[in-house]
Image (tube, rainbow, N blue to C red):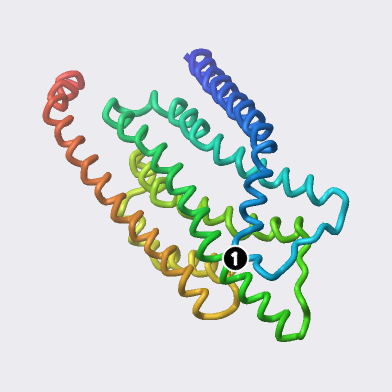
Amino acid sequence: MSDDREMTVVEHLTELRRRIIWVLVVFVAALIVGFFAAGPIVEYLKEKPITEGVPLISLHPSDALRVYMQFAFLIGVVVTLPFALYQTWLFVSPGLRDNERRVTLMFIPAACVLFVVGLLFGYYVVFPMVMQFVSGISLGMDIKPNYGIAEYFGFLMNMVIPFGFLFELPIVVMFLTRLRILNPVRLAKVRRIAYFGLAVVGVTLTPPDIVSDILVIIPLLLLYELSVWLSRIVYRKQLKEDETWEKEYGWEADEAVR
């Protein structure tokens, strides 16, 4: 029996390794495609009002290559995300019921949409506030800002990408609730801690002024409350499913025990 169990663990690890390899293969392919698609995206972002009046200059021969690689990486992540989530679902789905498999599969497109929405929120809401703040400091010191293109887009990535992952919170909570790892009761108990953590994240990612902090922290708190609400819906359905299953098959289990 111990040999069978060991074989099962080995099979699971082999399957996990195989799925990780496939995700890496897709990511590398998306990275190559993203390198060629990075040019038009960089040109589009350079023309946005965020950089209006502030020239972008190259400070190093490899700056252009560095920018291309940054955007290729971002494109690779966005393209690979649905495939990676699907591979994750395939790995955990054998341990789920049929109805749970169908429901959790629907999380994948929602997770991808929320990731993109988070990127847009970071770029169109948070990043302009940060740039306005830092540019205001430079002008206040009578310093004409000139941004190195690699530093500018690196700063943009560091500001925007975290919001893509933060906006995944509702989907992650729903998925973990479906797996019975989380439930709305636990989420309600840690609400204060979660609020504090999200507030720290919001303050860290925004300029040190109260308006910017509020504009970022409030959406993060709303995301958490949305997560609790969605977890509550999923949890109630689970309770009804368990009750139905108990009525249909519970007596057979009792007979088998006897």
Determine whether, in the image, residue 115 is placed left or right of residue 37: left
Question: Residue 51's quadrant in the figure?
Answer: bottom right
**Residue at (35% x, 45% y) in the render:** 174
Q: Position of residue 169 (x, y in %)?
A: 43, 52
In depth, the one of 252 and 194 nearer the eye is 194
Tell me the SS state at disc 1: helix
Point out residue 62 in the picture as x, y percentages from the top left corner.
84, 48
Q: Is residue 241 above or below residue 140?
A: above
**How far from the left and from the top, in percent, is residue 114?**
43, 48
How would you rate the neighbour count of disc 1 (Cα within 10 Å): few for under 14, some for 14-19, many for 20 or more?
A: few
Q: Which residue is mark 1?
A: 49
- The answer to whether 220 appears left or right of 186 in the picture is right
Locate residue 255 relative to residue 182 in the image: left or right: left
- Residue at horizontal 68%, vertical 32%? 32
Hey, what amino acid is under mark 1? Pro
Q: Return the residue nearer the eye: 69 or 187.
A: 69
Query: Which image quadrant: the C terminus?
Result: top left
Outermost residue on the right side: it is 61
Residue at the image point whose x is 37% and y is 63% from the top = 222
Q: Is residue 59 left or right of residue 108?
A: right
Place of residue 113 in the rendered image (x, y in percent of width and height, measured from the top left): 43, 45
Image: 194 above or below 13: below
Q: Quadrant of residue 207?
A: bottom right
Which picture quadrant has residue 31? top right
Foreground residue among 91 and 28: 28
